[in-house]
Amino acid sequence: MEVAAAFLLVIIIIAAVIVGGGIYAIIAWLRRRQLDPEGDMVEGSSDASDSQRRPEHLAVDTDQKSRFAGTR
């Protein structure tokens, strides 16, 4: 009886590892697509013009010199 329970436990662990690995692979693939600089467009846009690209991030020395998108 213990051998059958151990065998079922091993099967369940293997199945959980396979499902977890698949979920991790899908999330990593989606994250890579999201962070791709060539394909980083504003969500919901249908045409891919350069005016719709997200603004580049700025490196600043202090917080008081930072500029944000949409401000002067």
Image (tube, rainbow, N blue to C red):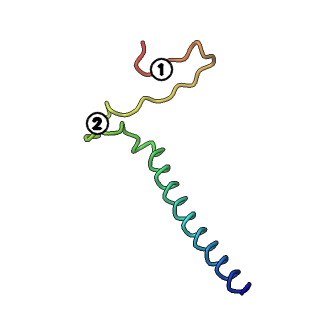
- Distance between the Cα atoms at labels 2 and 1? 22 Å
Determine whether 22 is above or below 45 in the image.
below
* Amino acid type, callout 2: Ser
Which numbered dot is residue 11? none
Q: Position of residue 15 (x, y in %)?
A: 58, 73
First in sequence, mark 2 or 1: give its number. Answer: 2
Q: Is residue 65 left or right of residue 41?
A: right
Query: What secondary structure is found at the residue carrying circle 2?
Result: loop
Determine whether 20 is above or below 34 in the image.
below
Q: In this view, does 3 lie to the left or right of 16?
A: right
Tell me what residue is drawn at x 43 percent, y 22 percent. 69
Query: What secondary structure is found at the residue carrying circle 1?
Result: loop
Judging by the rendered image, the residue that carries numbered circle 2 is: 49
Judging by the rendered image, the residue that carries numbered circle 1 is: 68
Q: How dense is the environment of label 2, judged by Cα within 10 Å: few (below 14), some, or many (20 and up)? A: few
Q: Where is residue 60 in the image (x, y as percent from the top left)?
A: 59, 21
* Amino acid type, callout 1: Phe
Q: How dense is the environment of label 1, judged by Cα within 10 Å: few (below 14), some, or many (20 and up)? A: few
Residue 70: quadrant of the picture: top left
Q: Position of residue 65 (x, y in %)?
A: 56, 14
In the rendered image, the residue lying farthest to the front is 1
Tell me what residue is drawn at x 45 percent, y 42 percent. 37
Residue 43: quadrant of the picture: top left
Q: In this view, does 57 lie to the left or right of 4?
A: left
Depth order, front residue of 3/54: 3
